[in-house]
Amino acid sequence: MTRKISLSGIKPTGTLHLGNYLGMIRPALELVKEYRAIYFIADAHALNQLRDAARLESLTYEIAAHLLALGLDPDEVVFFRQSDVPEIFELTVILAASTSKGLLNRAHAYKAAVDANLAAGRDMDAGVNAGLYTYPVLMAADILLYGSHVVPVGQDQRQHVEMAADIAQTFNHAYGEVLVVPEALIRPEVALVPGTDGRKMSKSYANVIPIFAPARQLRKQIMGILTDSRPPEQPKDPAACNLFALYQHFAAPDQAEAMRQRYLAGGFGYGEVKAELFEALEARFGAARERYENYMADRLFLEKTLLRGADRARAIGGPLLERVRAACGLRYYTARG
Ligand code: TRP
């Protein structure tokens, strides 16, 4: 029996943090056993935000090195860089014809930009480039090109996956069942990973803890995590503490339970919890951080790995694109030439 396909992408716009790890990277890596996994670095999506070629290139390598260090096996997973697969861009143009403008108007990221403009008394589309507006179409092409069944993502990407499903249905309605309608796979229990200030961990809040922060930086960031001001002797509520929420994600289950009991009993300070969180993160990521440094020092290896992945992605996506072309009346390969 052929396995179903799990596909996901990471946009190289910043350093990967613990929220990315719990929300997307770990679930995606766990699916590798059950699904045929296709994971990629969405560098063309990042173009909408970055205007710096060298930075885009180095962030792309960083993401590649992160995933390899965290256990992605490039022989098992089809792992590539989006811009090495031109079929994605061709499919984007075709899908745009099956995408209503109204659908794109409702995209959260676009709406947020419009709302911010209106609140500031500017033109609604000030500073909004067409790439941001059509972002969901490119993402739909990413997903639909391989017949992906599930898309493991964080909660913030749910709408994009639903839009991809919507676009696939519109296409199929017109041309027959060519595209697989995908589904988002979101882990409810990690839907919210708090950052150092207690809000959702997010680059835009500047409250992130990088996965591979050097030990000294990691310690400093953990020490800076906001807590309430209860004195050590008082009992504390683990459910209301973002420090505990983070600890719980990274400690072994029995350690987390022991810590929960200590919270309820009181008689310790948050400083102790911070020290234990540091230990738990070191235990979890220390060895992987070394692998990460080694990969980062070997760009040629990263490059070769990504290019090999792109060849495999094109071998899967190419035939599907031909079926799409044929279905909608564009010339397709066997009729060309
Ligand atoms: N939009 C996703 C993000 O910002 C990245 C992404 C691009 C993606 N293409 C995708 C995720 C396809 C899943 C599937 O996180």
Image (spheres, grey):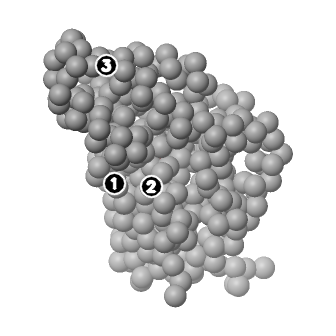
Tell me the element at label 3.
Answer: helix
- Going by the numbered disc 3, the residue's amino acid type is Tyr
Eyeballing the image, is 283 above or below 331? Answer: above
Under mark 2, the amino acid is Pro
Query: Which residue in the protein does label 3 denote?
Result: 270
Nearer to the camera, 150 or 135: 150
Query: Is the C-beta separation of discs 1 and 2 under 8 Å?
Result: yes
Residue 329 shows up from this direction: no
Mark 3 vs mark 1, CA separation in Å: 28 Å
Element carrying mark 2:
helix
Query: How busy is the neighbourhood of tag 2: few (under 14 within 10 Å), some, or many (20 plus)?
Result: some
Spatial distance from mark 2 to mark 3, Cα to Cα? 29 Å
Q: Is residue 225 left or right of residue 85?
A: left
Indicate which disc, 1 or 2, sits on the residue closer to the N terminus. 2
Q: Is residue 140 above or below residue 206?
A: below
Check disc 2 and report the residue beneath it: 27
- Looking at the rendered structure, the kind of residue marked 1 is Arg
Crowd rating for badge 3 (residues with CA inside 10 Å; few <14, some 14–19, many 20+): many
**Residue under label 1:** 187
